[in-house]
Amino acid sequence: MAAIRLHPTTKKPSVYWYEPSGKKRQKTFATRTDATKFKKIIEAELLTNKYISPFAGQTLIQEWLEVIGYSKQSNRESTKIQHEQLYNKLIIPFFGHRRLDAIKPTDVVDFLFHLQELKYASESQRKALNLLSRIFATAIEEDMIYKNPCKTSIVRSSISAQEFREQRYLTREELTWLSESIDPHFKELILFAGLTGLRKGELFALDASDIQGSTVAVSKSLSLIRGELVLTQTKTPKSVRSVEIPEELVYYFHDRKAGPVFTSLQGNRIQPNNFRKRYFILAVENSVGIPFRFHDLRHTTVALAIKNGRYPFEISKMLGHTIIKTTFDVCGHLLN
């Protein structure tokens, strides 16, 4: 199966073996003890059909990324662009020059700490972690490495702790306070977001034609793609849903006759980044005064729904989560 012989030049112990393809391989060691250990591993892998070439993982991460491409198949152009940006901005600078087989779980944790130091939110950290994990998952499929260093308890606990520290939600009084601190034109937008849990893109994509009596149909999302506002599919098929209009906002929706439900001051669709920079951040500073993202209004929806006695499966459906586990993963600490 495998044999140990002295290398003809270095005179150090070398293990020689044949791969399943018939290719002859050789690896040299400093001591015979190390060579013997390696020989046993190779022979065991060959006997159990679990052989992975010890040289396969020597591919650099950036090189492997160029082979597999930047994004899984996706119908959303905005998702593809976002993935490429995350790879180029975060992952390649940190890992690109390193080999696939050289990355340990502690390296991944260091990467997450690095992102935290750069003030990236846990949501961005998780997206970067998922993309990094994909690199190793595809390498495993091609028998290049054994394990995915991202799929370990030390990594999961690291990002979960960060998410727990960052999550914010408002009381009903604070939500009202925030809505009254923003430009009056956007008051109903803030209240609707905090009471229904719609994603930002879903809110900005709503049209008068989506209003169906006391509910609104959520079937699309507004994305910024290469500087252009584009209506796209919702995040997942389960995100297509019907959401009840809060009683206190029925007047606002019934006044919408045509066009977008929520508009800019000029009557156009809202540009998400402009809205955040010009109105939302200032309103937060003038009201609740804590680090608070627009996305945290979804957490506020959960907190208020729980206080009102809603069941987890109802909350999951309202948020448009594909599976109820997602609701527990994101907001589980609020359900306890």
Image (cartoon, rainbow, N blue to C red):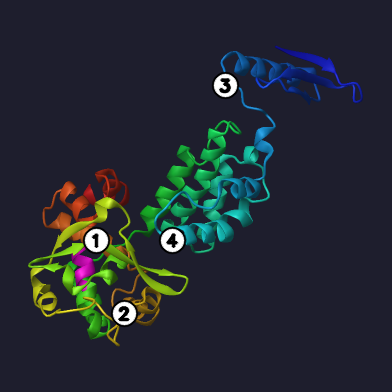
Please, is residue 228 above or below residue 92 in the view?
A: below
Residue at 28% from the left image edge and 77% from the top image edge:
287
Between 181 and 198, which is closer to the camera in this rendering? 198
Q: Nearer the viewer, mark 4 or mark 3?
A: 4
Residue at 32% from the left image edge and 77% from the top image edge:
270
Q: How many neighbours does mark 3 have within 10 angstroms: few (below 14), some (14-19), or many (20 or more)?
A: few
- Looking at the picture, how far across and down is residue 36, in whole percent? 73, 16
Determine which quarter of the picture holds residue 216: bottom left
Mark 3 or mark 1: whose residue is earlier in sequence: 3
Q: Is residue 199 visible?
A: no
Q: Which residues are magenta?
A: 191-199
Q: Is residue 314 visible?
A: yes
- Rendered image: mark on residue 50: 3
Residue at 18% from the left image edge and 60% from the top image edge:
304
| Residue denoted by label 2 | 283
Amino acid marked by disc 4: Glu
The Cα atoms of the two marked residues, 2 and 1, are separated by 29 Å
| Residue denoted by label 4 | 77
Mark 4 or mark 2: whose residue is earlier in sequence: 4
The Cα atoms of the two marked residues, 4 and 3, are separated by 38 Å
Q: Nearer the viewer, mark 3 or mark 1?
A: 1
- Rendered image: mark on residue 219: 1
Amino acid marked by disc 3: Lys
